[in-house]
Image (tube, grey):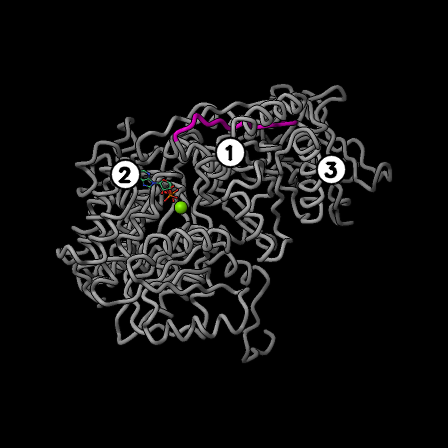
Amino acid sequence: MSPPKTAVKVKSAPQKALEKLGLRRDIDLALHLPLRYEDETHIGVLQDARDGETMQFEGRVTDCEVVYRPRKQLIVKVQDPTDECTLRFFNFYPSQQKALAVGQQVRVRGEIKGGFLGWTMLHPSFKAAGGDLPSALTPIYPTVAGLPQAYLRKAVLAGLARADVSDTFAPGDLASFEGTRFKGASFEGASGQGIWTLREALGFLHHPAPDVSIDALHDHTHPAWQRLKAEELLAQQLSQLQSRRERAALRAPALLAPDSENSLHARLLSSLPFSLTAAQVRVSSEIAEDIKRPVPMHRLLQGDVGAGKTVVAALAAAVCMDAGWQCALMAPTEILAEQHFRKLLGWLEPLGITTAWLTGTQKAKDRRAMLALIESGEAKLVVGTHAIIQDKVQFKNLALAIIDEQHRFGVAQRLALRNKLQHDAMEPHLLMMTATPIPRTLAMSYYADLDVSTLDELPPGRTPIVTKVVHEARRHEVIERIRAQVAQGRQVYWVCPLIEESEVLDLSNATETHAELSGALDSPDVHFPVGLLHSRLAPDEKKAVMSAFVQGRTSVLVSTTVIEVGVDVPNASLMVIDHAERFGLSQLHQLRGRVGRGAAASACVLLYSSGDAPRLSEAARERLKAMSDTNDGFEIARRDLEIRGPGEFLGARQSGDAMLRFANLDEDQALLEWARKEAPLLMDSQPALAHKHISRWLGTKAEFLKA
Ligand code: ADP
Ligand code: MG
């Protein structure tokens, strides 16, 4: 008799694990592809084993005992016709111990290690010897704890059998595309072309044919993989195209640039102490063209550190104010926001513009006054930190929001910004600025919904920064060099290392360095004051330290990484980064960008130490080498992508969910180009198929991609 059925279905642990992996629909299961394959089709012999390979053999258990030193473990010896192997288990059940009793014939499979004491395997899988051998390779799927391969495999195959895997684009659409052709004719799909249908590709990858070699599968150039990578990239392009088109249906104030000589824009331009670079002129007109349309702009302005993004932002703000609307500029840190505020005030106050200042730390009274200025519209320009997007802030008529160092803001903050700034069913135009240039392939894939403007030219008269990588043992020479610089009236930054998870250590390190440099530079006979900036200072104190340095009253600024972004003191000509090996590449480049802003020759010293280790890690060495090889932010960004992969690069833009799983932007650029061309064609000619494709691949993730 079967047990009575209960009304409520309780989900089993593996079912929950499937959901955790995001495998809810049949199609999700069908698109959950193997990480790799194992060859269980034949039995090897120990004599032919290679160290480190995964293999299986059959033999007789000759010894099985539990030992307690150094910790409890089961040690089993198995003999095959050629040799012996020791199996070791740290976790085991009594039933397993029984199955491995002396005299049992077993089939063992695992990674084999050779060594002084003979062959060993740690936690191999095993079963009774003599069972059937599978005829094809066994797929191994990405999984999580509590979800055994066998269960997952069954679920995937069942999902594949039920799912609709009909093509959303014909193999012919890819056929014209050279990069997808596979060299081996034997792999041609049933379609007779080098390109497979989705059904063929999935069938092949989940159920490899008996004669296929592991290498052909592990190499993602196989046509079945090409098909899946093309599918995935197309989904990404389609979803971004869709969000771009949805945005095109939204309304924004049309900000027409006036051509009058009395306009704020014209007066600002003529009052600047320099003339714009060609790149600044070009980028400014790209922005002007965009904001004069009644559709919200979403533009990323990228330009290397020191390229002069602030003045481009100010000119866009001027166009906005000329049209009678408000503009806001938001920066990720108070120091940076303050610096923008001062700079913009310097440019715009003489032209009669009232600028409001907003941060989380200002006094309630000041804040109320600012809020009133913003609400009445008297303040045409608002500068501040993310305090700008807090609830209390009411704009009269905001039309342009500028976000500096946009990658430092999280997805949630950016969404809040868009919601906050909407009014009268209008959205403001958005200009995001970044000094971390996005490599072309990333811009084309993850940022395809944005328009990108690039400042690819530095203002004239800058001398390139010379970067030196120096061992910690030569610290005293570096201090001598600082002394020489300050004696010539120059200023110096000294950035203290990031000490992971310890603000206290960070601080004590910065304090010690400050004492050390003060001792060397600021004594009764030589007088070069040294400032100290760290995150524990109150906002007022920070401000005081910063302005002392800006005004040249201190010669050296010792700082934790709070100065990382945007700080602009043209007289500073030497940057020392202590324990540079602990910093990320883009951070190093940002820090270095604090110098080389004036005409004086500038240098950056990367002090490193390998600590207790005999040498630096490979990645640390690559970072330091990249820094000494080039000053070019794009090249740095490219190398950073190489060292770290896109996951970290994108930071808060997207979580792992939306990452590409199969395609690799480095290797699959050609496929990416194809997807970029294909997406609008498909969306226009077969919108239903395009939507089916998006939902098939991205399901509920599509929304997230828009943030
Ligand atoms: P970033 O792009 O890193 O934000 P900034 O906007 O801070 O760069 O500009 C760096 C420095 O260059 C500032 O001192 C700025 O006033 C100056 N600058 C900007 N544009 C020009 C230009 N066309 N000619 C000369 N100096 C410029
Ligand atoms: Mg800047």
Most foreground residue, 344 or 93: 344
Q: Is residue 224 visible?
A: no
The response on whether ligand 1 sits within 8 Å of label 3 is no
Q: Position of residue 464 (x, y in %)?
A: 40, 26
- Pointer 2 local density, CA inside 10 Å: few below 14, some 14–19, many at least 20: many
Secondary element at tag 3: loop
Q: Residue at x 78, y 49 (%)?
A: 94
Which sits earlier in the primary sequence, circle 2 or circle 1? 1
Against 25, residue 95 (above or below) is above
Which sits earlier in the primary sequence, circle 3 or circle 2? 3
Give the number of the disc on residue 104: 3
Most foreground residue, 4 or 624: 624
Q: Which residues are magenta?
A: 599-609
Number of numbered tags placed on the structure image? 3
Amino acid bearing label 1: Asp
> Circle 2 is placed at which residue position?
671
- Pointer 3 local density, CA inside 10 Å: few below 14, some 14–19, many at least 20: some
Assess whether mark 3 and mark 1 are in contact (beta carbons under 8 angstroms).
no
Q: Residue at x 36, y 49 (%)?
A: 433
The furthest residue to the front:
525
